[in-house]
Amino acid sequence: MQEQMPAVFGILMVFMILGGVVLGVVLTVIPWWKICTKAGFPGALALLMLVPFANLILPFYIAFADWPALRQARGEPGPMR
């Protein structure tokens, strides 16, 4: 039994690390996806929250950019596509 303990501990650590990464991604990307879509930006922009340094820039961009959703609510024309 003693010789199996390191293997069990290693397996447990792998599951804990993977669970933490998955939980971190879920708790980060899903709320930012909703924020981006409600502001009128593509939801996939939230994936930048997984990129180092981009996760520091994205909140500032969202905060200070002209939101397409507000522009549309005011009746202003959007960019030509």
Image: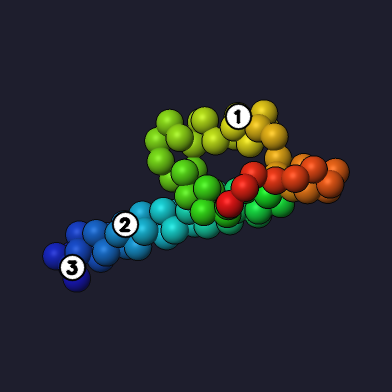
Which residue sits at x=59%, y=32%?
61
Q: Looking at the image, tell me whether mark 2 or mark 1 is earlier in sequence order.
A: 2
Residue 4 image offset from top left, x and y in percent: 18, 67
Q: Nearer the viewer, residue 53 or 81?
A: 81
Tell me what residue is drawn at x 58 percent, y 52 percent: 81
Please identify the residue farthest to the front as the structure is shown. Answer: 80
Q: Residue 34: x, y in percent?
A: 65, 54
Q: Position of residue 57 (x, y in %)?
A: 52, 30
Q: Quadrant of residue 52?
A: top left
Circle nearer the viewer, 1 or 3: 1
In the rendered view, tell whether residue 54 sits above or below residue 74: above
Mark sitting on residue 13: 2
Question: Which residue ends up furthest to the bottom in the rendered image?
Answer: 1
- Of label 1 and label 3, which has the lower sequence position? 3
Q: Residue 70: image x %, image y %?
A: 78, 43
Q: CA distance from mark 2 to mark 3?
A: 14 Å
Instruction: Give the secondary structure at mark 3.
Output: helix
Which label sits on residue 4? 3
Say what amino acid the circle numbered 1 marks: Phe
